[in-house]
Amino acid sequence: MIEIRELTKRYGDRTAVQNLSFTAAPGQVTGFLGPNGAGKSTTMRLIVGLDAPSSGTALVNGKPYAQHRAPLQELGVLLEAKAVHPGRTAFNHLMALAYTHGVPRRRVEEVIDLAGLHSVAGKRVGAFSLGMGQRLGIAAALLGDPAAVMLDEPVNGLDPEGVRWVRELLRDLAAEGRTVMLSSHLMSEMAQTADRLVVIGRGRLLADTTVDLLVEQAAGGGVRVATGEPARLRSLLTAPGVTVTSRGDERLVVSGVDARRIGQIAAEHQVPLYELVTESVSLEEAFMNLTHDAVEYHSSDAGRAV
Amino acid sequence: MAASATASTTLAPAPACPVYRVTGRRVVRSEWAKFWSLRSSWITLGVAVLFLVGIGAIGAALYSPSGPLGSASAQSGPALTLALSGTNLAALAIGALGVLVSAGEYSTGMVRSTFAAVPARLPVLWSKCAVFGPIAFVLSTIGALVSFLIGAAVLHGQKIALPLGHAGVVRCLVGAGLYLGLVGVYGVAVGVLVRNNAGGIAILAGVVLVLPGLTGLLPSSWGNDVSRYLPSNAGQSVMTLHPSGGSLISPGAGVAVLVGWAVLLLAGAACRLRRSDV
């Protein structure tokens, strides 16, 4: 269980996380989603106490992380930035962490096998590919057999096989009753893994929801209609809660009425329809709509023109 | 939550009560393992010992009675001076290694793993000192002893020859080891303070090698007082047979000053460690 209560972190005059509250519950995969620079990594650093919050609290299994007697057994973390000395072998890196908690060598070998690092365990980490480094980070997160895991962009740099492995691993961990929290800036990744979604932008909570609910909420999709008599259809459809916008000569986009009802109305009044399509909003679009105002780094056309 | 059939493929079920625990001894064990699992540790330690033994042996081999030390009597300890002439360079290597032990964690990012495992942080600082200080002390003492013994063999029969059993010789050799061990601790503390390999090493080299020379520029009325309490000169008084004259304090006071510097630097490092974000 990871509980964030009114967490705020300021670096100088920049506020990285502002009044953030959410809970990652056991037995679920909680997706922590937001555009680059939204404050995901900062929040994770605050949770493990690498940074001190300006105000608010972050509790792991009921206590601040640093107050646990065996922190690695409470929460396993993979932070986005590299957290390994490149001159040390993967095995020695894990052993060094294991020693602090009295984790036996047997367990170190277990997580090495689990992460598929067996053949490279004796190699120095500096020579690792991004994907292998990521596997090592996940192995380290699992070292203490933690009740909760928190992974920052875990699939970064992984090949498709590795991506699938991480997804299954996280689902299994949650199924065992552990708390699983992972961050991503990719909605599609979350849709495949997460039960719940915590969306932040510019350090603020934008949504605390589920994948399905998010789509529903953000679905400004509406129904696309093409007709020979757009003006007439428009007046026929006019009702409270219904909006009709025209797109081109013959096209209308209607929201507030479903396609079935529009078809009925058109048939009753003998308005010919050439097209009647429900526009579904993709998760990616739903996410973009939600975070549009909170994106830190917009790519702009102006920049390209220069 | 019912554990599904898939659970067995990943991990053993979480134990009901914690079996793991962070203790001071375990953190020391971890730092010990970290130290020896890096090549830079072996290389730099080797270089330090090589400086101590090599320069000492060369000094003894190049000795000639007509040289600058020729007029000195054996009792004033020129044989010891020769044996320990590599101390300054060895201090540079050991101090630099101390910086790498701590600042190296910041420059590589390892520090995030370290402090995620030991979020109390301070045990890590104490453990680094408890591991590297004694390693540097023991190896330096051995190096100084070997250097002296080689010198004694080379200088056998010469006027300045000094036996190991001569009063104060062992104290000086152990003193050299103590000085270098503490320089290692200074390095660890400075590394935590500046969090940067190059910067830390530069500061350490400045304090050990450059600062003593600069105090010569101060007005002699008080420049000497400052100079005597610098780590390098306090170190000299610990490893000199008869520290005398205005420039050196007594060996006992030297030890106190050296330890005082370590306490001061470690206090600063501890403050920074507790207060700053990683």
Image (cartoon, coloured by chain):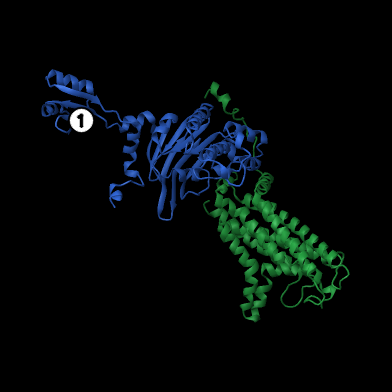
Chain colours: A blue, B green
Left or right: residue A275 versus residue A88 is left
Q: Position of residue A215 (x, y in %)?
A: 34, 30
> Which structural element holds mark 1?
strand
Q: Residues within 10 Å of mark 1 (few under 14, many from 20)?
A: many
Residue B32: in sight, yes or no? yes
Residue at 80%, 60% (x, y): give it.
Answer: B146
Q: Identity of the amino acid at label 1?
A: Val
Residue at 18%, 30% (x, y): give it.
Answer: A252
Q: Position of residue B54 (x, y in %)?
A: 75, 62
Left or right: residue B135 versus residue A48 is right
Q: Is residue A253 above or below residue A261?
A: below
Q: Position of residue B97 (x, y in %)?
A: 65, 56
Residue B116: in sight, yes or no? no
Residue at 66%, 62% (x, y): give it.
Answer: B92
Looking at the image, which is closer to me, A42 or A119?
A119
Mark 1 lies on residue: A253
Q: Is residue B108 above or below residue B95?
A: above
Q: Position of residue B41 (x, y in %)?
A: 66, 52
Q: Is residue B94 above or below residue A278?
A: below
